[in-house]
Image: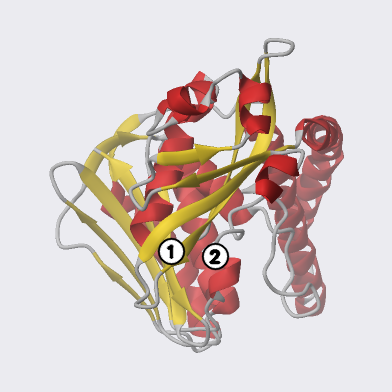
């Protein structure tokens, strides 16, 4: 542990069940929490109240899967009495038989870079609002031209294409605004009582023509209605993002959408048989502006999964993913009823 005591960041180890077994002197100096107090789950008291539940859920998910852990949270600094943003990482150490025998982790202070992100998102919010006004006017003008009766077939196709491009720009701007709202804690929900299965089927039907045009079989299954109190428009946004990704990365293979439930939770699943996701990329696909493939192959700003995850968490739920390279991916949105 000599190296762990020398580095200028918090280093820790934990048992297979997540109980902390060691924290270096930097952790104690930073948080004021000694090793004896930090053992077990005592360290969690240093995590900001608003971040603790989400952080611990992500930590439990990583332990359950035996997968590398990565999560941002605010940690208390005793020197000035403030909570500063940290990036927490942990990797499992395994025995020769593959069993997890311990976890090795770090907490890295990222406050300065986080503040830079806040400044960027504030700019995106202002820019998005300014772009929306002229874009809306342009879309309305194009739609009025499209509905004219004296257009040639060729002109109508061109105007229709222009309308679709303005709609695409609108979606990009909406995503930028959502990123800004999420970062500043202003993502609001408007819950209503509705059938999740019926909503998901509506979204699937909207994609059916696009899927058929690419020769992609798109199926939907829901054994029974699934009623709950959620924000319908936000969950439509999540389903749309997942289906759009399935079409983009599915390599023209079948896509299956399903909705199931038990007494405690509802689950919306979108599965494809496409390119899949490499194991080392699974921990970062839900990050802002993150794409696991180069922009030359697939377009997009890398915001859809990040926004979808934040919407699920705002409902008290989560998004899970099972994937293997070359064998497709299954995304599951789990929502409390």
List x then y, in percent, for residue 17.
Answer: 33, 48
Q: Secondary structure at mark 2?
A: loop
Q: Secondary structure at mark 1?
A: strand
Q: Which quadrant is the C terminus positioned in?
A: top left
List x then y, in percent, for residue 55.
Answer: 48, 37
Give the answer, above or below, for where 239 lies relative to 130.
Answer: below
List x then y, in percent, for residue 137.
Answer: 81, 41
Q: Name the residue at 42% across, 37% down.
A: 56
Q: Which mark is residue 321?
A: 1
**Cα–Cα gap, marks 1 and 2:** 8 Å
Badge 2 is on which residue?
Answer: 282
Q: Name the residue at 42% across, 32% down.
A: 39
- The local crowd at label 1, few if under 14, some if 14 to 19, many if 20 or more residues have their Cα within 10 Å, is some
For residue 212, side relative to residue 224 (left or right): right
Sequence-first disc among 1 and 2? 2
Give the answer, above or below, for where 298 lies relative to 91.
Answer: below
Given residues 154 and 273, the one toward you in this image is: 273
List x then y, in percent, for residue 3.
Answer: 70, 50
Q: Is residue 201 visible to the viewer in this orientation of the structure? A: no
Q: Name the residue at 55% across, 83% down.
A: 275
């Amino acid at each position: 542990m000599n190296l762990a005591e020398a580095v200028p960041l918090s280093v820790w180890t934990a048992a297979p069940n997540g109980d902390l077994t060691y924290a270096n002197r930097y952790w104690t100096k930073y948080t004021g929490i000694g090793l004896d107090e930090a053992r077990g789950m005592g360290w969690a008291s240093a995590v900001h109240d608003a971040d603790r539940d989400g952080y611990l859920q992500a930590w439990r998910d990583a332990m359950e899967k035996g997968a590398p852990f990565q999560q941002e949270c605010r940690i208390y600094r005793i020197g000035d009495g403030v909570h500063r943003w940290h990036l927490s990482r942990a990797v499992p150490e395994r025995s020769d038989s593959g069993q997890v025998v311990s976890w090795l982790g770090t907490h890295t202070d990222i406050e300065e870079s986080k503040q830079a992100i806040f400044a960027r998102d504030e700019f995106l919010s202002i820019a998005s609002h300014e772009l929306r006004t002229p874009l809306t006017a342009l879309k309305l003008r194009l739609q009025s031209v499209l509905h004219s009766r004296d257009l040639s077939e060729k002109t109508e196709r061109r105007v229709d294409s222009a309308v679709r491009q303005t709609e695409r720009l609108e979606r990009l701007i909406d995503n930028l605004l959502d990123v800004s709202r999420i970062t500043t804690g202003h993502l609001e929900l408007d819950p209503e009582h509705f059938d999740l299965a019926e909503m998901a089927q509506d979204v699937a039907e909207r994609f059916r023509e696009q899927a058929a045009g690419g020769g992609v079989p798109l199926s939907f299954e829901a054994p029974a209605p699934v009623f709950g109190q959620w924000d319908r428009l936000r969950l439509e946004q999540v389903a749309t993002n997942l289906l759009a990704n399935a079409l983009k990365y599915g390599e023209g293979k079948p896509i299956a959408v399903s909705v199931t439930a038990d007494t405690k939770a509802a689950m919306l699943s979108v599965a494809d048989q496409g390119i899949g996701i490499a194991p080392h990329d699974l921990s970062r696909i839900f990050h802002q502006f993150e794409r696991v493939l180069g922009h030359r192959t697939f377009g997009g700003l890398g915001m859809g999964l990040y926004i979808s995850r934040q919407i699920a968490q705002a409902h008290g739920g989560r998004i899970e993913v099972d994937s293997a390279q070359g064998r497709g991916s299954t995304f599951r949105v789990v929502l409390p009823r």
